[in-house]
């Protein structure tokens, strides 16, 4: 193993030198970051304490869904639709992103890990996008659990057999579309906010403040504003905005949008795009 | 209570730029009240949202969370807590000093602005009621979040989930939960001091005040007990 | 100053199922004692238990006869300098040390604070914010805060970490001086020369267990199953080498330009035999030095598996 050198000095070849094997590129490292971040989001591969909060929220959502299913099967009409359950759970999802987003980005900032990432094949935007995709997937999973429970409960308890199941599948598809939209927008709002601070405490605080304060502001404007302003007030608050999109797409949801549905759709798209752009920009500018 | 600890804690909290983060919330509350008041829409329409949903339900607990978990939680996180712990002080004294600072700052940053908003929306009576209720609420929240910072390594995350899922979601839908809700105590106390249609009280005032005192006592005692057996561990990760 | 001792009796500490400290019994008395061990041996865990910051999972930790755990009263006689250098950076050193004095409820906190700051020679920069300090200055400010109440016991976790050589010397002087006043001083280190320069008394911890206690030179002598190595200079090295080889107590001799190196099996027998042999053969002994009494040798012996 060792190659003799002059005067008894030696450089030991322990396998790092002259590596001849295959080197994976950017795409591989981006995918690795995505998978790793997704696991981090739910605390997999980490201590039980790290799993407690994210998995706890997931479990709560599933239990709530189970209760809703049981109640629904006793009633002639389901209490909530698939779209409705996503709309309701979006409030809980804001708590989820406020807890999880700092786990994904703040710890890397705090522990000065960025130089280690950026001195390797992945580019700065790869890092940002992989983290964003991981958070969006984690939020989607939070919606997917309850949706699945509801589907299984409703589809198999129904008496209408196969046609009932087909009908449920169609409705489930609407729920999934809603969940995807909500997950992307919530992640795109929370992650740039979290990346502002290296301390998880402050990152969490910034995200909660952003979500929690906007809701009553938009609520008041809805009360005091004249027609159009009241219809557009929901744009101020991310959760109301998402519910407005649900209203526009599926005519379900908790917010009144009047004839401004497309505005909500556009606003959601702009918000997701702006969040992504800001996050990428943040990591392009960050000093390492 | 220990004056040295109180003074240093207050300086750590207010003496830095970070303290400016406490300003936007009360500014928004008062600004929105002024705006709504200016439109001529009756206060009964917007009052419950501004004072209740925004002031009592969001700004008060959020301020208490930021402040309450900072007074002790930040020191535990960065390890400076050892400097105070390595002194021959009764642990109760440390907890009470920290609680006092958290209470004072939360009252200043959330309860006082809430009273100002109440004065604009409903006059001096409502202002007095809100000041009383929110001051009691501030103390109760501070005690709860102080206890959280000794029970968990992530007090802010736990506190956030408590505010969002317990205080804001469960209390609204499961009526039994109101017995253990600081937000309900605050509203009930305010409504008892000065009954108002803008407040939506669901508990008798005396019961609410008694329960609030119980929560404060429990939080303080729990925090003291935990601090007595405080074990230093390595870096959190 | 009366001596206050720190006693550990059958102390173990485990985190989950990892045993960090395993059945340690030791007493630390007046003077400077080095707590020695490789990184991760359990030194910090031991110090934290002594300082009442960790409960022993088993056994008893006493300071001046009183249990350390859940007993804030011990801090009247205990000064502690932890390894983590976190300090409230928004305070000046003066404010920081003064606050410590007040929290100890000293009769004259200002006088105590300025005395402590003088001891660590931080007088000039005491009114600057700690956040502007260098690593060594922070360390000294922390030592000042730990000394402000004139404690009988001083525990220091890796006190020389990050200090430059001059600061290191100053700190060593300081510890020497305080030990001469009869204080009990225990400091941990994984750097052997620090311990060697500062104290003869060591407590060696390896993998959570107490491997040796006492004067390291004596410890070395107790290790009889490993040859002692001496370097000898004499008027006739070659002759001395030949006659020494005949001795029972000698297992090997090497001729070197600087003298001869002798490996002896038994310390006592060899030193007596050497004098006799030299006299009989008319060889004048010029120098006799134990070649491997350095702490490093002792340590590598204890740590070797």
Image (cartoon, coloured by chain):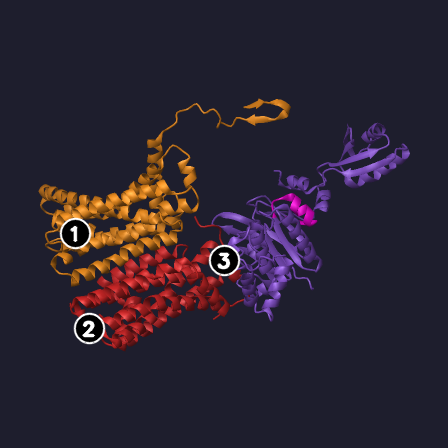
User: Which is more toward the observer, A195 or C242?
Assistant: A195
Question: Where is residue A127 drawn, in percent x and y?
Answer: 35, 39
How many angstroms separate mark 3 from mark 2 (CA)? 48 Å
Question: Where is residue B168 drawn, in percent x and y?
Answer: 26, 61
Residue beneath disc 2: B197
How many C-alpha atoms fall within 10 Å of the one at disc 2: few (<14), some, or many (≥20)? some
How many C-alpha atoms fall within 10 Å of the one at disc 1: few (<14), some, or many (≥20)? many
Residue A19 is at least partly visible in this image: yes
How many angstroms separate mark 2 from mark 1 (CA)? 30 Å
- Chain A: colour as depicted: orange
- Chain B: colour as depicted: red
Residue beneath disc 1: A244
Label 2, secondary structure: give it: loop
Residue beneath disc 3: C88
Q: Tell which tag, 1 or 3, sits nearer the viewer.
A: 3
Q: Residue at x 15, y 67 (%)?
A: B41
- Chain C: colour as depicted: purple
Q: Are marks 2 and 1 on the same chain?
A: no
Q: Identify the magenta region.
A: C189-203
Residue B71 is at least partly visible in this image: no
Q: Is residue B142 left or right of residue A170?
A: right
User: Which is more toward the observer, B24 or A69?
Assistant: B24
């Amino acid at each position: 193993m060792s190659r003799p050198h002059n005067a008894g000095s030696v450089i030991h070849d322990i396998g790092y030198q002259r590596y001849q094997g295959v080197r994976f590129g950017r795409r591989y490292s981006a995918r690795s970051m995505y998978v790793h971040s997704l696991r981090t989001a739910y605390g997999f591969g980490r201590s039980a304490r790290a799993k407690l909060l994210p998995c706890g929220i997931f479990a709560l959502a599933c239990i709530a869904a189970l209760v809703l299913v049981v109640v629904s099967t006793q009633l002639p009409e389901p209490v909530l639709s698939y779209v409705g359950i996503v709309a309701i759970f979006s409030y809980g999802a804001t708590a989820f992103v406020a807890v999880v987003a700092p786990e994904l980005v703040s710890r890397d900032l705090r522990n000065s890990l960025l130089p280690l990432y950026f001195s390797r094949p992945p580019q700065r935007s790869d890092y940002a996008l992989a983290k964003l995709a991981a958070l969006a997937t984690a939020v989607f999973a939070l919606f997917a659990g309850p949706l699945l429970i509801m589907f299984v409960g409703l589809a198999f308890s129904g008496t209408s057999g196969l046609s009932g199941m087909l009908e449920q599948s169609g409705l489930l598809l609407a729920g999934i579309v809603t969940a995807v939209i909500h997950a992307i927008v919530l992640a795109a709002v929370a992650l740039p906010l979290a990346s502002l601070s290296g301390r998880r405490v402050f990152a969490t605080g910034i995200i909660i403040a952003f979500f929690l304060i906007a809701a009553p502001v938009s609520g008041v404007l809805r009360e005091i504003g004249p027609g159009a302003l009241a219809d557009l007030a929901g744009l101020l608050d991310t959760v109301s905005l998402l519910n407005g999109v649900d209203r526009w797409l599926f005519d379900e949801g908790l917010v009144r949008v009047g004839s401004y549905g497309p505005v909500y759709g556009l606003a959601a798209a702009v918000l997701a795009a702006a969040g992504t752009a800001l996050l990428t920009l943040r990591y392009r500018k960050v000093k390492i | 209570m220990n004056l040295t600890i109180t003074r240093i804690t207050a300086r750590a909290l207010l003496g830095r730029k970070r303290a400016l983060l406490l300003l936007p919330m009360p500014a928004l509350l008062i600004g929105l009240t002024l705006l709504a008041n200016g439109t001529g829409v009756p206060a009964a329409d917007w009052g419950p949202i501004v004072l209740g949903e925004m002031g009592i339900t969001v700004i008060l607990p959020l301020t208490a969370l930021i402040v309450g978990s900072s007074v002790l939680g930040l020191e535990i996180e960065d390890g400076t807590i050892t400097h105070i712990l390595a002194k021959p002080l009764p642990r109760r004294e440390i907890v009470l000093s920290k609680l006092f600072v958290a209470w004072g700052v939360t009252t200043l940053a959330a309860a006082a602005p809430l009273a100002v908003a109440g004065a604009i929306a409903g006059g001096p009576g409502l202002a007095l009621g809100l000041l009383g209720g929110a001051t009691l609420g501030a103390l109760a929240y501070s005690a709860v979040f102080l206890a959280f910072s000794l029970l968990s390594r992530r007090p802010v995350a736990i506190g956030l989930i408590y505010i969002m899922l317990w205080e804001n979601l469960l209390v609204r839908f499961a009526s039994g939960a109101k017995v253990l809700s600081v937000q309900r105590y605050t509203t009930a106390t305010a409504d008892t001091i000065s009954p108002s249609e803008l407040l939506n009280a669901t508990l008798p005032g005396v019961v609410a005040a008694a329960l609030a005192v119980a929560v404060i006592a429990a939080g303080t005692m729990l925090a003291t007990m935990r601090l007595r057996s405080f074990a230093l561990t390595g870096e959190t990760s | 100053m009366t001596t206050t001792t720190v006693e550990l009796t059958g102390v173990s500490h485990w985190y989950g199922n990892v045993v960090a400290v395993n059945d340690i019994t030791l007493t630390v008395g007046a003077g400077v004692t080095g707590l020695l061990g490789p990184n991760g041996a359990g030194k910090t865990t031991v110090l934290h238990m002594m300082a009442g910051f960790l409960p022993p999972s088993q056994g008893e930790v006493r300071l001046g006869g009183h249990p350390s755990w859940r007993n804030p009263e011990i801090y009247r006689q205990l000064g502690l300098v932890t390894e983590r250098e976190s300090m409230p950076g928004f305070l000046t050193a003066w404010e920081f040390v003064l606050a410590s004095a007040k929290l100890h409820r000293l009769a004259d906190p200002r006088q105590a604070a300025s005395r402590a700051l003088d001891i660590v020679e931080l007088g000039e920069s005491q009114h600057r914010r700690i956040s502007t300090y260098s690593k060594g200055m922070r360390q000294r400010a922390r030592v000042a805060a730990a000394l402000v109440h004139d404690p009988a016991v001083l525990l220091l976790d890796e006190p020389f970490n990050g200090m430059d050589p001059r600061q290191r010397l100053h700190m060593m002087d300081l510890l020497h001086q305080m030990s001469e006043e009869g204080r009990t001083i225990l400091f941990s280190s994984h750097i052997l020369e620090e311990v060697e320069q500062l104290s003869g008394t060591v407590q060696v911890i390896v993998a959570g267990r107490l491997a040796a206690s006492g004067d390291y030179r004596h410890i070395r002598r107790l290790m009889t199953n490993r040859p002692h190595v001496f370097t000898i200079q004499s008027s006739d090295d070659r002759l001395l080498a030949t006659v020494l080889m005949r001795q029972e107590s000698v297992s090997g001799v090497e001729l070197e330009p600087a003298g001869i190196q002798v490996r002896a099996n038994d310390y006592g027998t060899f030193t007596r035999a050497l004098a006799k042999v030299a006299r009989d053969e008319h060889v004048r002994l010029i120098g006799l030095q134990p070649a491997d009494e350095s702490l490093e040798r002792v340590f590598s012996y204890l740590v070797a598996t």
